[in-house]
Amino acid sequence: MAAEERGFHAVFVETVADRYLCPICFLVLREPKLTDCGHHFCTNCFADLPLEPAVPARVECYTSCPSCRARLTKSEIFPNNALKREILDLMIKCDRREKGCEWVGELRNRETHEKECEYVEETCENKCGIMVIRKEMKNHKERLCGRRVTSCDYCSARMEWMDLAAHHLTCLLYPVGCVYSCGQTLARGQMEDHTGRQGNCPNSILSCDFRDNGCQFEGKRHNC
């Protein structure tokens, strides 16, 4: 059984009195049960104790009290709601105080605070796999997350931010320098027109206009 289902593990404002502690899990009593022999245990801690076979004189199986070894049947343990209320009145601090949460409140309000605490870590809603505290989730999703949706500044295509760099390698509107180093910058998709026979790149290597007639000459545009 999980520890959180046994006693309360919390940061209490004041030192907790021994009478509020379970002698089985040594945590603050959760759903305290009072035995016929006068001892208190967490409901789930007591439920985990092994049962002994019934003896002929009894109709119920029994267990032994961990504190005094007295024999107890289920009918000899009772919920102590008065003690439960005292325990729920105890003041605690948020478990995430070291991260910055300053909440202090009654133990009974712990679950409500957990649902609202800005310092609880959650998996990024964009499913990038990163854990982020709630108060920083909006900034992470919009400005830092690798899976946030963004647009290419040149062609306006929509994609995840982590794919943007790879997209720039093929984007036809991305500005690149001339492949013949003429000093001109133009959109990648315009490169063929710029360097082709009808283009204006002075460094383009072109074949002679009479290549079909057998001329093998190739050279820069101004030499053709």
Image (spheres, helix red, strand yellow):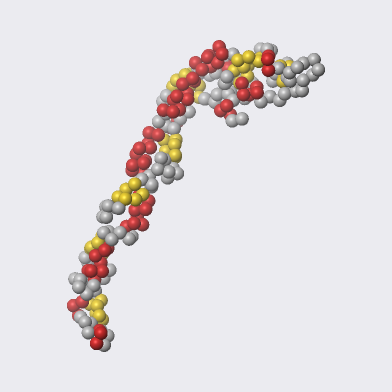
The residue depicted at 24 percent of the width and 71 percent of the height is 195
- 208 left or right of 112 in image: left
The residue depicted at 77 percent of the width and 23 percent of the height is 53
- x, y (%) of residue 16? 55, 18
Q: Residue 136 sits in which quadrant?
A: top left
Q: Residue 189 sits in which quadrant?
A: bottom left
The residue depicted at 40 percent of the width and 31 percent of the height is 118
Q: Is residue 103 above or below residue 19?
A: below
Please count the marks in the image: 0
- 59 left or right of 163 in image: right
Q: Quadrant of the N terminus?
A: top right
Q: Can residue 169 be seen in this snapshot?
A: yes
Nearest the viewer among 101 and 194 is 194
- x, y (%) of residue 193? 23, 69
Q: Residue furthest bottom?
A: 214
Q: Is residue 121 above or below residue 33?
A: below
Q: Residue furthest right?
A: 56
Q: Residue furthest front?
A: 59
The residue depicted at 23 percent of the width and 72 percent of the height is 196
- x, y (%) of residue 183? 22, 66
Nearest the viewer among 85 and 20 is 85
- 179 left or right of 5 in image: left
- x, y (%) of residue 159? 34, 50
Q: Can residue 18 be seen in this snapshot?
A: no
Q: Quadrant of the C terminus?
A: bottom left
Q: Is residue 139 above or below residue 72?
A: below
Q: Residue 194 sits in which quadrant?
A: bottom left
